[in-house]
Image (cartoon, rainbow, N blue to C red):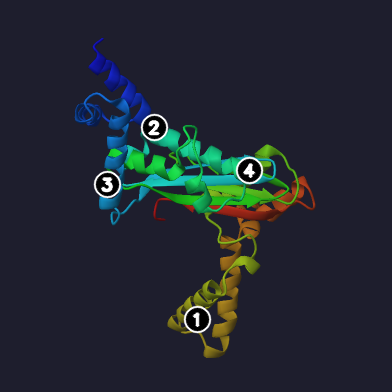
Amino acid sequence: MSKLLEDIKKLRALTGAGLTDVKKAIEEAAGDLEKAIELIRKRGQAIAAKRGDHEAEEGCILAAHEGDYAVMVGVKCETDFVAKNEDFIKLVSSILEVAKAKKGASKEEILAAPLADGRSVQDHITERSGVSGEKMELGVYEFVQGAFTTSYIHPGNMLATIVAFNEATDAQVARDVAMQIAAMAPVGITEEDVPADVKERELNLAREKAREAGKPENLVDHIAQGALKKYYKENTLLDQLFVKDNKLTIAQYLQAQSKSLTVTAFKRVTLKAE
């Protein structure tokens, strides 16, 4: 194998860049691999800056849990083709490992944290942007803490959930709840978690529907309150019917495992519009 081919193979392994980009960088650097790597990185920075106003609506979200801590990270990109690239997914996985190790860090701390080669998460995202020619960003970083945690990644890596419980429970029970959150997208754990503006919005919608249906004005508020209770049942986690057994609410399902078992926190993130 010629030296040029060896250098191309080595540089592709180091940077993940395409054949044409690698060959061009080696030629411009007159065979100096360190300079070639720097040229590829600078190209990534230039592309990232140039595409800063582009929409990054695809990507990969990964999640993990260990003991009392669960975390999810997601890197956004522009196309499904890049989102499914093996090297792109490996990058997200390596960022997830950093996030697991740096429990409770800020997003800025995660971006500044070094990966295995000593360069920062942000540097790696920028470099991958240059390789792909697409805008990329750390668009998702969430974590929960509790006595017991779990995580769930929906097939396709576009949706993930992380959940914290007040006490330890069976892993399958925890996973059932994480999958429930993925499927049913609750807005909170109980009605107390529903924001005031959401409550007011639902009440106003119900009042309008009641008036359009010709209901007496003195009954409109009563009807709206009934509609709000229905909203809570459909959109708060503990009141939702369990997707695996619609004879039970999630609260009842948890209490069947332990009278005191409940969810204390959860996060659900999807990159797809719903």
Q: Which residue ends up furthest to the top in the rendered image?
A: 1
The relative height of residue 50 versus residue 81 in the rendered view (above or below) is below
- Mark 1 vs mark 3, CA separation in Å: 54 Å
Q: Are marks 1 and 2 in contact (CB under 8 Å)?
A: no
> Mark 1 = which residue?
207
Horizontal and vertical percent for residue 100? 59, 41
Alpha carbon distance from label 1 to label 4: 40 Å
| In-front residue for pair 55/17 | 17
- Is 268 placed above or below 232 here? above
User: Which amino acid lies under the numbered mark 4 shown in the image of this protein?
Assistant: Thr
Q: Across the whole image, how many numbered discs are drawn on residues?
A: 4
Identify the mark nearer the N-term, 1 or 2: 2
Foreground: disc 1 or disc 2: 2
2 on left or right of 173: left
Name the residue tied to disc 3: 46
- What residue does disc 2 label? 87
Q: Give how far apart the Cα atoms at labels 1 and 2 are.
A: 52 Å
Task: Classify mark 3: helix, strand or loop.
Answer: helix
Three-letter amino acid code of the residue under disc 1 = Arg
The percent position of residue 205, horizontal first and vertical second, equals: 47, 76
Label 4 packing within 10 angstroms: few (<14), some (14-19), many (20+): many
Mark closest to the chain's N terminus, 1 or 3:
3
Q: Which residue, given by chain and number where applicable, does mark 4 sit on?
A: 150
CA gap between label 4 and label 2 equals 26 Å
Counting other residues with Cα less than 10 Å from the Cα at mark 3, is it few (<14), some (14-19), or many (20 or more)? some
Disc 2, disc 3: CB below 8 Å?
no
Q: First in sequence, mark 4 or 2: give its number.
A: 2
- What residue type is disc 2 on? Asp
- Please tell me which residue lies in front, 80 or 11: 11
104 or 197, which lies in front? 104
Q: Is residue 238 visible?
A: yes
Rate crowding at label 2 as few (under 14), some (14 to 19) or many (20 or more) other CA atoms within 10 Å.
some
